[in-house]
Image (spheres, rainbow, N blue to C red):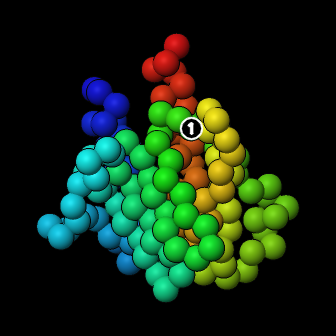
Amino acid sequence: MNAEEWIRAKVSRAFRASVDAGIGRWPSEGDEADPEWGQVLYKYADRRMSLALFEAGCERLGGDRSERLAYAEIQDVVPLLLTELVRVRDLDAIVGIGVRLRTRTAVIDVPLRVYSTLCPTLKHIADDFSLRAR
């Protein structure tokens, strides 16, 4: 299984319950592929931001910070500390996922309802790319 097939399967499994619960959606016919990153696999949007997962990267737009991250560039994903996470009481609260890239560090700000699936998914993708690189 190549990297794109593995990512499609991983995103499909990881976000199935979220989509079933109305948190985000699968791609529709109106979603165009990104020339650099391929097909859209999952989308989430609210009044503050939007998030799109592609075959080769993810994009978070909106608010005061936007990020485009290629999966192959991710070195590590840093989740919130449990002591910070338990203080968050609202599923719409914005929380940050720390991402160490080869050349910089980034933060992807998403609502807690998305964080709970996105953070471990990005971590698995980063780990898989790291193993493939060895």
In the drawing, does residue 101 fall left or right of residue 15?
A: right
Residue that sits furthest to the left in the current view: 29
Which residue shows up at 21% across the image and 61% down it?
32
Query: Please, is residue 107 above or below residue 87 in the view?
Result: above
Q: Nearer the viewer, residue 42 or 38?
A: 38
Which element type, helix, strand or loop, lies under badge 1? Answer: strand
Residue 9 % position (x, y): 31, 43
Amino acid type, residue under disc 1 in the picture: Ile
In the drawing, does residue 115 fall left or right of residue 56?
A: right
Residue 66 % position (x, y): 55, 64
The answer to which quarter of the image holds residue 96 is bottom right
> In the rendered image, is residue 106 in sight?
yes
Q: Nearer the viewer, residue 47 or 125?
A: 47
Q: How many numbered badges does the structure rendering display? A: 1
The answer to which quarter of the image holds residue 87 is bottom right
Residue labelled with disc 1: 74
Residue that sits furthest to the bottom in the current view: 47
Residue that sits furthest to the right in the current view: 83
Which residue shows up at 45% across the image and 58% down it?
59
Residue 24 % position (x, y): 39, 72
Query: Please, is residue 132 above or below residue 86 in the view?
Result: above
Badge 1: few (under 14), some or many (20 or more) residues near its Cα, within 10 Å? many
Residue 7 % position (x, y): 36, 41
Which residue shows up at 55% across the image and 32% down it?
127
Which residue shows up at 32% across the image and 44% down it?
36
In the drawing, does residue 75 fall left or right of residue 15?
A: right
> In the rendered image, is residue 15 in sight?
no
